[in-house]
């Protein structure tokens, strides 16, 4: 579970960091859904998100993993509500970037991330986080491959959430 959990926590960290810097897309998405949407509030929530992810990446254990799972359940609920209510969000606000509307892929990735973090919280993995890499057995090539594949998986998950919706959006003439 180490690789998928690191990917999950890294995406949470990236989203939190980007929303701290650029809260406007998230604030817009919250406003369209009828939720409190002040940029300062978005920044506070994003800072909490970043702190949870940092703890998870540091190997803080089951509590950090549970908080990551709760975060993704919340994101999944937001995306599901937007999709079910047919709210035409220009952005879900996940990465502080405009033009990334929520999709079914987005919902599925949020649910998968919640399941991974939930499994780690229930003891299906070690402490979680980057500490798993330092305690791995095996040749350096195997450990380096693990790091490279985990980084590639994180990028692909980000691309599925932030870039794929742009490719699927109708092109304006």
Image: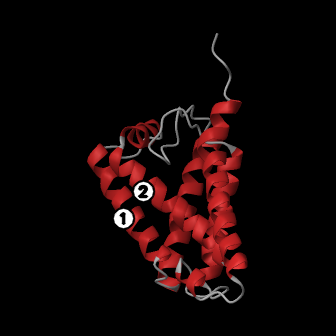
> What colouring method underlies this structural image?
secondary structure
Q: Residue at x 67, y 47 (%)?
A: 160
x%, y% of residue 131? 53, 83
In this rendering, the answer to whether 9 lies above or below 166 is below
Mark 1, Cα crowd under 10 Å, few <14 / some 14-19 / many 20+, is some
x%, y% of residue 166? 63, 32
In this rendering, the answer to whether 18 lies above or below 142 is above
In this rendering, the answer to whether 137 lies above or below 164 is below
* Circle 2 or circle 1, nearest the eye: 2
Q: Nearer the viewer, residue 103 or 17?
A: 17
Kindly identify which residue carries mark 1: 48
Q: Is residue 103 left or right of residue 92?
A: right
x%, y% of residue 164? 67, 39
Quadrant (top left/top right/bottom left/bottom right) for the N terminus: bottom right
Q: CA distance from mark 2 to mark 1?
A: 8 Å
- Indicate which disc residue 16 carries: 2
Q: Nearer the viewer, residue 96 or 138?
A: 138
In this rendering, the answer to whether 133 lies above or below 150 is below
Q: Are marks 2 and 1 in contact (CB under 8 Å)?
A: yes
Q: Earlier in the sequence, mark 2 or mark 1?
A: 2
């Amino acid at each position: 579970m180490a690789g998928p959990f690191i990917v999950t926590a890294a995406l949470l960290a990236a989203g939190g960091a980007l929303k701290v810097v650029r809260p406007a897309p998230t604030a817009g998405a919250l406003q369209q859904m009828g939720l409190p949407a002040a940029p300062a509030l978005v920044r506070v929530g994003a800072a909490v998100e970043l702190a949870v992810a940092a703890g998870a990446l540091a190997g803080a254990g089951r509590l950090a993993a549970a908080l990551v799972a709760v975060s993704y359940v919340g994101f999944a609920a937001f995306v599901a509500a937007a999709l079910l209510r047919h709210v035409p969000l220009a952005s879900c606000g996940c990465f502080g970037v405009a033009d990334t509307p929520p999709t079914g892929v987005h919902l599925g990735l949020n649910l998968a991330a919640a399941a991974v973090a939930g499994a780690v919280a229930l003891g299906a993995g070690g402490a979680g986080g980057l500490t798993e890499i330092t305690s791995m057995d095996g040749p350096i090539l195997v450990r380096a491959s693990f790091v490279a594949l985990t980084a590639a998986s994180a990028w692909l998950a980000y691309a599925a959430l932030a870039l794929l919706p742009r490719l699927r959006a109708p092109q304006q003439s």
